[in-house]
């Protein structure tokens, strides 16, 4: 499991923010969002359960500090059809960085910050999230593919087939990598 930071530097202009969509994998672009929302699309595969937001950080604007109170961080696992509230901002009274844990029980490839007041008074938003790490498994798959097929054992064939299957979550990836490592070591 790897962790990555997603920084979404936002413009301070309250009037522009309700229409700003931020994608850390692409350039900032405008999109027709409901008034009072900022969408942040995280890294990861939206079709898998691999993206788990762990923590959100935010820095208030130096002016209108308390307007950030009431903002709601939301996550979606279905492309934005439904949203789950992850954190509601409260107690903000100083222009500084704030950091809060988010849900670890579900994967949310889509994140949104809602500003019910319509004033998106935030200087910067940061997300720390995990992404399933397939590095070792992919390396072992390449190693297995380099083996002469005449040397394949039934265990290696089964382990390679399983490693190429649709694995959900870090535990399944690690188990498949270990199974493939053992099969390769037995050659």
Image: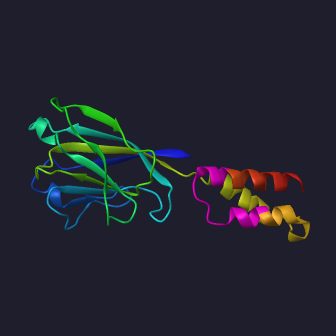
Identity of the residue drawn at 46% across and 47% down: 105
With respect to residue 47, does 97 lie above or below? above
Residue 55 occupies quadrant: top left
What predominant SS class does the magenta segment belong to?
A: helix
Identity of the residue drawn at 82% across and 51% down: 182
Task: Look at the image and tell me whether residue 87 can be seen.
Answer: yes
The magenta-colored residue range is 159-174
Q: Which of 44 and 146 lies nearest the eye of the viewer?
A: 44
**Direction from residue 103 to residue 176 in the image, left or right:** right
Residue 171 included in the magenta stretch of the image: yes
Q: How is the image coloured?
A: rainbow
**Direction from residue 73 to residue 4 in the image, left or right:** right
Residue 166 included in the magenta stretch of the image: yes
Point out residue 68 in the picture as x, y percentages from the top left corner: 16, 41
Count of picture labels = 0
Point out residue 172 in the picture as x, y percentages from the top left corner: 64, 54
Query: Please, which residue is most extreme toward the top here?
Result: 94
Tell me the quarter of the image containing the C terminus: bottom right
Point out residue 7 in the picture as x, y percentages from the top left corner: 33, 47
Task: Look at the image and tell me whether residue 146 can be seen.
Answer: no
Identity of the residue drawn at 17% across and 32% down: 95
With respect to residue 23, does 61 lie above or below? above
Query: Please, which residue is most extreme toward the bottom here?
Result: 150
Residue 134 occupies quadrant: bottom right
Identity of the residue drawn at 20% across and 43% down: 123
């Amino acid at each position: 499991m790897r962790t990555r930071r997603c920084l979404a530097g936002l413009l301070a202009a309250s009037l522009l923010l309700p229409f700003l969509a931020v994608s850390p994998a692409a350039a900032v672009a405008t999109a027709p969002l409901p008034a009072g929302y900022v969408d942040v699309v995280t890294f990861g595969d939206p079709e898998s359960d691999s993206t788990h937001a762990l923590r959100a950080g935010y820095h208030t604007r130096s002016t209108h500090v308390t307007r950030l109170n009431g903002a709601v961080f939301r996550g979606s696992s279905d492309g934005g059809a439904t949203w789950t509230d992850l954190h509601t901002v409260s107690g903000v009274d100083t222009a500084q960085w704030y950091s809060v844990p988010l849900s670890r029980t579900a994967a949310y490839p889509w994140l949104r910050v809602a500003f019910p007041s319509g004033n998106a008074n935030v200087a910067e938003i940061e997300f720390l999230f995990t992404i399933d790490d397939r590095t070792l498994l992919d390396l072992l798959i390449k190693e297995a593919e380099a083996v002469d097929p005449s040397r394949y054992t039934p265990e290696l064939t089964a382990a390679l087939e399983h490693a190429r299957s649709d694995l959900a979550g870090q535990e399944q990836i690690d188990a498949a990598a270990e199974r493939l490592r053992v099969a390769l070591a037995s050659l």
